[in-house]
Amino acid sequence: MIYLDYAATTPLDPRVLQAMLPHLTADGSFANPASTHGPGYKARAAVERARAQVAALLGAEAPEIVWTSGATESNNLAIKGALEFNGGHNGRSPHIVTSRTEHKCVLDTCRHLETQGVRVTFLRPGTDGVVSPEQVLEALTPETVLVSLMWVNNEIGVVQEVQRLAPLLRERGVLFHVDAVQAAGKLPIDLRVIPIDLLSVSAHKIYGPKGAGALYVRKKPRARLAPQMHGGGHEWGMRSGTLATHQIAGMGAAFEIAAAQLQDDARRVAGLRDLLWQRLQALPRILRNGDPQRAAPHVLNVSFEGVEGEALRASLPDLAVSSGSACSSATQEPSYVLRALGRDDELANASLRFSLGRGTTAEQIEQAAESVIKQVQWLRELSPLWKP
């Protein structure tokens, strides 16, 4: 099996596993990090070290990192928390601006808030997948509390212009939340320079454990959130619950490794992505989804004319690839991201997302391209609708 689904999840780095093991057993720092005794303090020290490691990759201060169970919780806390704390203006319903190509956990959170009276504007990107800062600014109203956009799209790899948009929103007093799950560890992030207020990250996208994530919450100027989980007042009152020391330690190690390897990883993976696209172009009438000039290094999304999508995926049993986000796979519908770009249902369904990572080799890319080319040609020959 050739694994090309790193955007869905990554394997645990062996170095991360070693960082987690000391916090699991009786002879290690297994204690509750909120406990006020020696073992508790030892566990707390591991949590705070990891907090600093995550902050370092993001160009943040350690107290600005709030632990969560993953990106879905981080996005919920950012969006719901900001709306609940800031509320409306002058008795009017609060307003959110986002896009139609966000991760499903953002879209579903916004749709839930609509049932609570919040107004949401869902911007449609251009055919290149980009939501321009001008679109966002035009959508703002006096009641706009929050703008939520992902830095790198998880299906097509397009990099949004968050660096240009952030200062424009700051000037207008609008909170800016960024889902940076596919950006962290792939692109340079420096929150000392980019005035983003809230930023979500996840461990398992960069070779850390599943079930661990964080939300960056800016201290100066302070982004205020209402907690969504209530209890013991952990994490400065923003996220109650006993901290999973072993997972947090693993996330810290993963982020530290990512910081050290970011440039080398990005350069190598981008080269393999370009090699794959070059090889696939042996097929006529294929389309690359998203602006190739604004592409993250690890994602390539391609539509294949003249084939049925389910048949294409079934014909590639030795390739771990996807048709889009793993979180949307249960719907069995064509990708809403590709449809937002203007692809029809048939073409959106006949698309594959290839996402590459540290374990990807040039040999695997050659084998994967050969398999895809062979199966697409075979399926086109079988199709009565295919006209060369």
Image: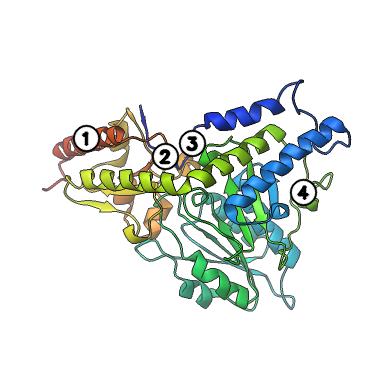
Report how far apart the C-alphas of labels 1 and 4 lie in the structure: 50 Å
Q: Nearer the viewer, mark 4 or mark 2?
A: 2
Dot 1 or dot 4, earlier in sequence:
4
Q: Which mark is residue 235?
A: 4
Q: Can see residue 169?
A: yes
Q: Position of residue 174 (x, y in %)?
A: 63, 72
For disc 2, the marked residue is 357
As drawn, 4 above or below 123: above
Give whichever of 143, 33 is nearer the camera.
Answer: 33
Q: Residue 78 vs residue 242: left or right?
A: left
- Looking at the rendered structure, the secondary structure element under dot 3 is loop
For disc 1, the marked residue is 370
Report how far apart the C-alphas of labels 3 and 4 lie in the structure: 27 Å
Q: Residues within 10 Å of mark 2 (few under 14, many from 20)?
A: many
As drawn, 137 above or below 37: below
Dot 4 or dot 2, earlier in sequence:
4
- Looking at the rendered structure, the secondary structure element under dot 1 is helix
Report how far apart the C-alphas of labels 1 and 2 lie in the structure: 19 Å
Give whichever of 124, 257 is nearer the camera.
Answer: 257
For disc 3, the marked residue is 10
